[in-house]
Image (cartoon, helix red, strand yellow):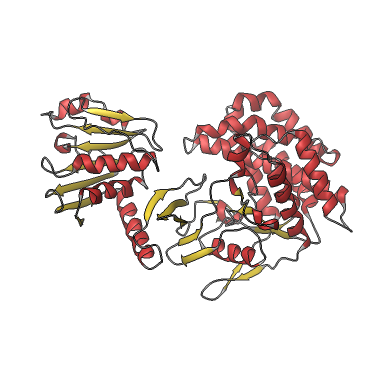
């Protein structure tokens, strides 16, 4: 339990907006207090917070309608007012239990809610009026962790140059990391919230997937990798302030000119894509350290993109995409063939000159920084899973983008340009072979990830990308040295299976 003092109506609304940063379906916020204590004010702040900057619209009290749904918000909300109800049975008739599956429920006058109504409930009891209100917060379920994390963030901001800044939701990725945009007057930065990752269940040799695939365990990787990239003149965001223990950092805001949005808006991508290719060619010519300094002492070690990591990623297809597309789990014989063929193919990723592989060098993670010069014009985010491996991997990430269409002629032109600027000693044939194999490996992994996001996380929107990714897979498998892989996919996952899976 925690009691806050709210010295104005604006402070009450701001509390609602702050809580909206952590909103997700299934949560319940029960608002208690006498008439005029600020329940509707807090609810409006929460709803406006989910609408984002500029989301200023009327949020009427649902006293007479009983419930009001807001379906177009970042997370849909049902705002309910149970003041006129007098029994639990009347509340049940509203169907709030069913709505709780896909909405956040904001409930004023919750006294007649069935108890216990939800395991994830935050009760806010408001008292006082005007500039002398208090809010007592009592939490259960996930709300306990949310409030504790929010207190850690508030303390972190107080120790930075961003104390008192406005906090706005900032769109992240498909991971568990959270981002906020901090705003004070005309200045902005990004808050990165990345607590240490708990180990998942063991999947092989007693190790969790994240450890085998060498996924970042905490925010140290972001800080160390970004610091080094910035020192070389690349466009990674500068880390302004970080607490490596709590997993919080304030990083440079690179703006909103994301490659994917630019392409969707029909903007000319020739220069941004060309400079992105030049970044990768430049990185391929450098000698990259396996360890880099870490702020506060120590070092961050980068893992090799080894066979175990490549293999466990491909098996996302057999674990998730196969049952999604075929309708049943893969059998031992097909799985054994799959593993054996890929094991031979991984040898094509061997290289005498490994580089840092950013791993997701694609449209959601690249920003065009037009006011800069040279290679720094390409903003690089989502660097935490950086490994040491073959330079072809990131080029495949860029030119075989899972989220947007890259026309074949554009792909071919940029690929040829990359080969041209690699310079003397570049073995184009060996590179093409590695590019095809790693492109096929990446497409295989992504098909599994998108199926998993749909099945496990309820994020079905990723399925629309499956035909595109499967198309990349087929183009890569056309390389003559990937004949065994092509025969396996053609026999077991033909194109019509991918179409059905979308």
Q: Is residue 240 visible?
A: yes
Q: Please identify the quadrant where the C terminus is shown.
A: top right
Please say if 28 is above or below 391: above
On the image, the x and y values in percent for residue 286 come to 76, 64
On the image, the x and y values in percent for residue 55 come to 37, 38
**Residue at the spot 70% in from the left edge and 57% down from the top edge:** 374
Say left or right for 65 vs 246: left
**Residue at the spot 69% in from the left edge and 68% down from the top edge:** 289
Q: Name the foreground residue: 48 vs 136.
A: 48
Q: Please identify the quadrant where the N terminus is shown.
A: bottom left
Q: Quadrant of residue 98?
A: top left
Say left or right for 28 vs 293: left
Please say if 412 is above or below 311: above
Q: Is residue 142 visible?
A: no
Say left or right for 450 vs 178: right
How many tags in the picture?
0
On the image, the x and y values in percent for residue 398 come to 69, 45
Please say if 481 is above or below 494: below
Please say if 370 is above or below 223: above
On the image, the x and y values in percent for residue 299 come to 59, 72
**Residue at the spot 22% in from the left edge and 37% down from the top edge:** 107
């Amino acid at each position: 339990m925690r009691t806050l003092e709210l010295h104005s109506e604006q402070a009450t609304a701001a509390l609602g907006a702050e809580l909206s940063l952590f909103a997700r379906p299934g949560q319940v916020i029960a608002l208690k207090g006498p008439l005029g204590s600020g329940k509707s004010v807090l609810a409006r702040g929460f709803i406006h917070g989910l609408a984002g900057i500029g989301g200023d619209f009327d949020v009427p009290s649902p006293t007479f309608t009983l419930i009001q749904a807001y379906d177009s918000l970042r997370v849909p909300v049902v705002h309910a007012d149970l003041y006129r109800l007098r029994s639990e049975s009347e509340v049940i008739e509203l169907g709030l239990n069913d709505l709780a599956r896909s909405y956040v429920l904001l409930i004023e006058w919750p006294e007649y809610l069935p108890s216990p109504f939800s395991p994830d409930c935050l009760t806010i009891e408001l008292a006082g009026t005007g500039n002398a209100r208090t809010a007592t917060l009592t939490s259960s379920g996930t709300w306990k962790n949310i409030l504790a994390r929010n207190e850690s963030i508030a303390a972190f901001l107080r120790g930075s140059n961003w104390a008192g800044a406005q906090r706005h939701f900032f769109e992240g990725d498909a991971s568990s990391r959270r981002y906020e945009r901090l705003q004070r007057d005309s200045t902005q930065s990004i808050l990165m919230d990345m607590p240490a990752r708990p180990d998942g269940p063991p999947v092989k040799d007693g190790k969790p997937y994240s450890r085998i695939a060498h996924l970042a365990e905490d925010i140290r990787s972001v800080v160390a990798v970004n610091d080094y990239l910035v020192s070389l003149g690349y466009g990674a965001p500068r880390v302004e302030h970080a607490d490596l223990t709590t997993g919080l950092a304030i990083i440079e805001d690179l703006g909103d000119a994301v490659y994917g949005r630019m392409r969707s808006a029909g903007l000319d991508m020739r220069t941004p894509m060309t400079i992105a290719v030049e970044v990768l060619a430049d990185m391929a010519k450098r000698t990259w350290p396996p360890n880099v300094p870490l702020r506060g002492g120590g070092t961050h070690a980068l893992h090799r993109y080894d066979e175990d990591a490549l293999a466990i990623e491909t098996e996302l297809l057999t674990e998730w995409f196969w049952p999604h597309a075929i309708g049943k789990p893969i059998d031992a014989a097909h799985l054994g063939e799959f593993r054996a063929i890929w094991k031979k193919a991984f040898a094509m990723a061997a290289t005498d000159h490994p580089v840092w592989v950013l791993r997701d060098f694609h449209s959601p993670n690249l920003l065009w920084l037009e006011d800069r010069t040279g290679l720094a014009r390409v903003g690089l985010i989502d660097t935490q899973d950086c490994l040491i491996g073959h330079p072809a991997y990131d080029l495949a990430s860029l030119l075989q983008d899972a989220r947007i269409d890259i026309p074949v002629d554009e792909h071919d032109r940029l690929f040829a340009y990359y080969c041209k600027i690699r310079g003397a000693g570049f073995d184009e044939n060996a590179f093409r072979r590695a590019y095809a194999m790693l492109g096929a490996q990446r497409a295989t992994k992504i098909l599994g990830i998108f199926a998993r996001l749909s099945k496990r996380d309820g994020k079905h929107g990723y399925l629309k990308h499956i035909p595109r990714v499967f198309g990349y897979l087929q183009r890569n498998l056309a390389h003559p040295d990937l004949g065994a892989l092509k025969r396996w996919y053609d026999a077991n996952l033909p194109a019509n299976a991918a179409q059905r899976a979308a």
